[in-house]
Image (cartoon, grey):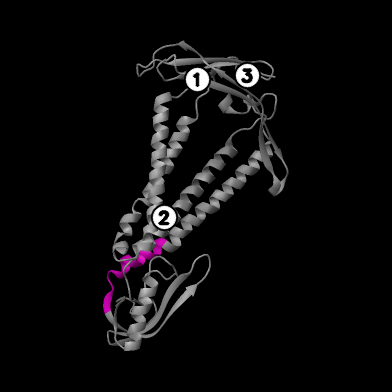
């Protein structure tokens, strides 16, 4: 049965909210990459040309931040000579944010505190073009880098998918008359009606490929830190494991589509109507078997929206459902030389 659609304004309102929600998510992801991940990579590349220097540590402290979890940040001040001039610095590592990825912050603080207390120097690096720029540890922390890249990429990916999907819904023409809803919906005008499995399968594969492209490098980036004893970075393995789950799901759906085929539905008459005949046939790319029963369910669904504002809710109530086994008849062979099974159902509903 043709569902009774909710109001056009309600559909457009939900689509706009979904688009804005996705846009915020995507902006957060791209911002995470732009302002946190990429600057670290840029600094790491530039610091490769910096010159070594001996740093005299003058003060140290370990700052902790409590919230959902405790993060740490090692601070230090030091002095050094470069080109016979005295300079002061305070940059400890490439990343300047507090974190709890591994124990780099605590170990670095301990090393610098020991140097301060015992009076010996530590190795550091100075920008020869700007000698007032310096750092003690110029090595990039790949575990932290993987986290920034994965989180930013996933936020950007999910947000973009939600925004694009919501935007596409706003472009869909909605019906102006509840008595002839197929006139305003292009998906209901063609006969046969094509299955949405292909477009869904493309979306699943696109999401799977992007997710794995973002997450699969993570274990390799974090390998050195893991071997050095920072076992906490092993959590980045969760992302490629989830990616493997998406890959399994995509392959499973692909095999299902290959088994059943496009399954076009031809209605006669087109469309079915309340109180009248709803009949048609579905082409299924399966060899005929007397033992195989194909059950088709016809439902009359009442879709309506109640409430307003934040309390707005869309309901889908099944007023009546009819389940019937399809009768098989034979059509032309499929291009793959397998027999096409045509299922015809006749159902009457009030």
42 magenta-colored: yes
Q: CA distance from mark 3 to mark 1?
A: 21 Å
Residue 191 placement, left or right of 338 = right
30 magenta-colored: no
> Looking at the image, which residue is at 60% across and 42% down?
15
> Looking at the image, which residue is at 41% across and 61% down?
37
Q: Is residue 333 above or below residue 8?
A: above
Residue 231 spot, x, y in % from top left:
35, 63
Q: Please, what secondary structure does the residue beneath circle 1 have?
A: loop
**Residue at the front extreme, as displayed:** 291
Nearest to N terminus: mark 2 or mark 1: 2
Q: Is residue 197 above or below residue 91?
A: above
Residue that badge 3 annotates: 272
Residue that badge 2 annotates: 150
Residue nearest the viewer, comparing 273 with 172:
273
- For the residues carrying marks 2 and 1, which lies nearer the camera in this image? 1
Residue 350 placement, left or right of 87 = right
> Looking at the image, which residue is at 39% across and 27% down?
258
Neighbour tally class for label 3: few under 14, some 14-19, many 20 plus, Cα within 10 Å:
some
Quarter of the N terminus within the rendering: top right
Number of on-image labels: 3
Magenta residue span: 37-52
> Looking at the image, which residue is at 54% across and 50% down?
23
Residue 9 spot, x, y in % from top left:
68, 39
Q: Is residue 338 above or below residue 246?
A: above
């Amino acid at each position: 049965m043709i569902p009774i659609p909710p109001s056009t304004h309600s559909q457009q309102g939900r689509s706009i909210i979904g688009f804005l929600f996705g846009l915020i998510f995507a902006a957060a992801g791209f911002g995470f990459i732009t302002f946190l991940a990429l600057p670290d990579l840029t600094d790491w590349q530039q610091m490769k040309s910096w010159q070594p220097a001996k740093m005299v540590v003058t003060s140290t402290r370990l700052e902790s931040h409590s919230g959902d979890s405790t993060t740490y940040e090692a601070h230090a001040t030091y002095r050094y000579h470069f080109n016979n001039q005295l300079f002061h610095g305070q940059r400890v590592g490439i990343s300047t944010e507090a974190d709890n990825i591994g124990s780099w912050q605590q170990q670095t603080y301990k090393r610098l505190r020991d140097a301060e207390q015992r009076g010996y120097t530590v190795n550091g690096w100075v920008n020869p073009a700007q000698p007032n720029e310096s750092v003690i540890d110029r090595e990039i922390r790949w575990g932290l880098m993987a986290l920034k890249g994965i989180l930013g990429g996933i936020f950007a990916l999910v947000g973009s998918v939600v925004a694009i999907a919501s935007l596409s819904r706003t472009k869909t023409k909605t019906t102006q008359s509840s008595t002839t809803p197929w006139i305003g919906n292009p998906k209901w005008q063609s006969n046969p009606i094509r299955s949405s499995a292909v477009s869904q399968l493309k979306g699943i594969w696109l999401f799977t490929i992007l997710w794995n492209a973002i997450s699969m490098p993570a274990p390799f980036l974090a390998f050195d830190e893991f071997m050095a004893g920072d076992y906490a970075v092993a959590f980045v393995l969760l992302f490629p494991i989830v990616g493997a789950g998406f890959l399994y799901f995509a392959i499973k759906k692909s095999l299902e589509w290959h088994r059943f085929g496009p399954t076009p539905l031809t209605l006669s008459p087109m469309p079915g109507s309340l109180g009248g005949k709803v009949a048609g046939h579905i082409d299924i790319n399966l060899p005929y078997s007397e033992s195989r029963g194909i059950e088709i369910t016809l439902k009359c669904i009442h879709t309506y929206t109640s409430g307003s504002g934040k309390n707005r809710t869309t309901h889908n109530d099944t007023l009546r459902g009819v389940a019937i086994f399809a009768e098989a008849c034979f059509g032309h062979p499929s291009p793959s030389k397998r027999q096409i099974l045509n299922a015809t159902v006749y159902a009457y509903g009030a």
